[in-house]
Amino acid sequence: MGRIFEVRKSTMFARWDRMAKQFSRVGKEIAIAVKAGGPDPGTNPALRRCMQNAKAVNMPKDRVEAAIKRAMGKEMDNYEEILYEGYGPHGVAILVETATDNHVRTVANIKSHFNKGNGTLGNSGSVAFQFKKMGVFKLKPQGLNIDDLELELIDHGLEEMGEGTADPGSNRDGEDVLVLRCGFSDFGKMQKALEEKKITPLSAEVEWIPTTTVQLPEDQAQDVLKLVDRLEQDEDVQKVFHNLV
């Protein structure tokens, strides 16, 4: 088992700013999950996943519970999930996942970020073909028989397994983890299989994995990461994906 391919993570902004952003992102995910499947994590797999991810970023339990209650209220904003596609400086492909209650504001802000970062916002379909939408589960490797687990999970949609690192901002920032990837359509099946094996992931996310990558000199790479950082700090942005290695 080798080290799984990972793109660079943007870690430029301050820890507390990053924590606040993570809480906001997970809070929106909780709202979307509750609106779609109800407030009971026992019957709502999407909400269970959100609660796991909240734990991974050290989001306090009372804030998680408050987010669930807010999502049940009639006054709660309905978030629309929109994917934006574009190119950063030096031809790096970028996808921006947003959750917004005002798409006019969001598209104007995203376009402004690309322009100021010497990038270009593209049309739908102009960039996404260079990525594959996948379920990504990160596990603590300790106590697992990795070879047996790999064989067992192939029947549940496992496509890739390898070593990786925990995400910046998580409570295991930089630690070695076991990374599982499955097709997007197999996400629920993989989540159920892990639950049946009493394995609780450190995180369970849907990510856009690049199928083609770009390598740049460090000064040019920093140009790209500055744009990624600018996008990540926007209040409507949930996640940013790119193909810079």
Image: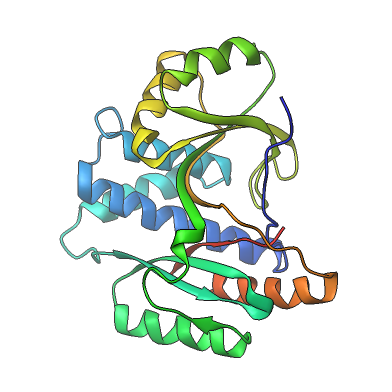
Determine the residue positioned at 34% across, 38% down.
Answer: 185
Q: Is residue 147 above or below residue 19?
A: above
Q: Is residue 11 above or below residue 228?
A: above
Count of labels in the image = 0
Q: Point out the image quarter for the N terminus.
A: top right
Tell me: 126 left or right of 185: right
Q: Is residue 167 above or below residue 202?
A: below
Q: Report x, y in % for residue 42.
A: 28, 27
Q: Nearer the viewer, residue 216 or 32?
A: 216
Q: Is residue 50 above or below residue 107?
A: above
Tell me: 185 left or right of 142: left
Q: Is residue 240 among the parts visible in the rendering? A: yes
Determine the residue positioned at 31% across, 84% down.
Answer: 104
Q: Report x, y in % for residue 16.
A: 66, 62
Q: Report x, y in % for residue 33.
A: 29, 47
Q: Report x, y in % for residue 85.
A: 45, 71
Tell me: 112 left or right of 105: right
Q: Point out the image quarter for the C terminus.
A: bottom right
Determine the residue positioned at 73% across, 68% down.
Answer: 12
Determine the residue positioned at 69% across, 74% down.
Answer: 224
Q: Nearer the viewer, residue 98 or 189?
A: 189
Q: Is residue 178 among the parts visible in the rendering? A: no
